Image: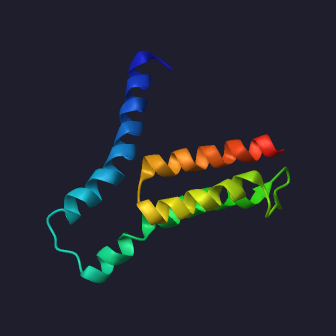
Amino acid sequence: MNSAEYLLLIGGMSLVTYLPRWLPLHWLSRRRLHPWLVAWLDLIPPAILSALLVPELITDGLPRQVVWGGPELLAAIPATVFAVWTRSLGGTVVVGMLSYWLLGLRA
């Protein structure tokens, strides 16, 4: 591949990455959404975060096996309680790291 083909490839990849994000945002920014749709859309970030975190918290090894007493899950419990209680992202990270560290000292 020559330089022109690389530039065309990068430009095409930029378009297919940028347009699917920009078009809905541009189209929806001029419209009023129903309250039930806004409420439903508010659930998407926690759902994605849960889908990313839960497998890491309750499984271990290859092939993946469920482990309910792993240090990750045990450290997540006080961090979750702290997060719900205070709504502080920084504090939640500190509590989670301290919990994980203390669990590592116990082992």
Q: Work out whether residue 50 or residue 83 is closer to the camera in this orientation and state it.
A: 83
Render colour scheme: rainbow
Q: Work out whether residue 11 or residue 104 is closer to the camera in this orientation and state it.
A: 104
Position of residue 97 relative to residue 28, above or below, is above
Please state the horizontal and vertical placement of residue 30, each as a whole percent of the image: 14, 65
Q: How many marks?
A: 0
Question: What residue sits 38% from the left and 76% below the top?
Answer: 40
- Quadrant assignment, res 65: bottom right
- The C terminus lies in which quarter of the figure? top right
- Quadrant assignment, res 8: top left
Question: What residue sits 34% from the left and 77% below the top?
Answer: 39
Position of residue 7 relative to residue 34, above or below, is above
Residue lying furthest left:
30
Question: What residue sits 22% from the left and 75% below the top?
Answer: 33
Please state the horizontal and vertical placement of residue 27, each as a whole percent of the image: 21, 62
66 lies left or right of 30: right
3 lies left or right of 72: left
Please state the horizontal and vertical placement of residue 102, each as a whole percent of the image: 71, 45
Q: Work out whether residue 32 or residue 72 is closer to the camera in this orientation and state it.
A: 72
Question: What residue sits 44% from the left and 51% below the top?
Answer: 89
76 lies left or right of 68: left
